[in-house]
Amino acid sequence: MPSLKPDEYTHSDLIWEKFVICGVDLQLTIEEIQELRRIQKKHRFHIRRFIKATVLLMLHQGHSLEDIAAIFSLNDNTIRRYVKAFKEKGLKSYMEDGYIPYSGNLSEEE
């Protein structure tokens, strides 16, 4: 980004700078946006998938990490992990939910 005086920054310059500073740079393709919106509207609602899809869409739209973290009660490191996973694995692998809830360490006898 070219060196600008503070009064010369546009809104999009400030958003871009904020993402770069925070380590979040996310540009989605039209196909990715359409697929994420489809996931949001899917009839079999999975809250974890909905949140993961919405986080990416909100970052793409220019929302701040702080706003997204507050809206979904997420840690900003979780959001960065989501972006990293999406960039490294692609959309399909990113959306796979391998979450296994804690089931305890007690045996059936205990």
Image (spheres, rainbow, N blue to C red):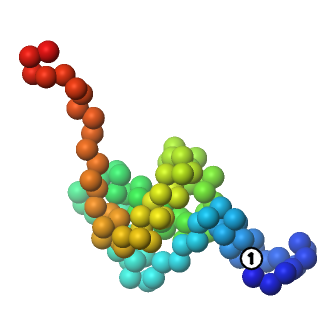
Left or right side of 51 for 98: left
**Quarter in which the N terminus is drawn:** bottom right
Quadrant location of residue 91? bottom left
Read off the residue under disc 1.
13
Which quarter of the figure is the C terminus placed in? top left
Residue placed farthest to the top in the image?
Answer: 110
Quadrant in the picture for residue 105: top left
Q: Nearer the viewer, residue 85 or 37?
A: 85
Q: Give the residue type at disc 1.
A: Asp
Q: Residue furthest left?
A: 109
Give the image quarter of residue 89.
bottom left
Q: Give how far across and how far down residue 58 sits, in percent.
A: 53, 64
Q: Is residue 61 left or right of residue 31?
A: right
> Does any portion of residue 61 appear in the rendered image?
no
Q: Is residue 96 above or below residue 105?
A: below
In the rendered view, tell whether residue 47 sits above or below residue 32. above
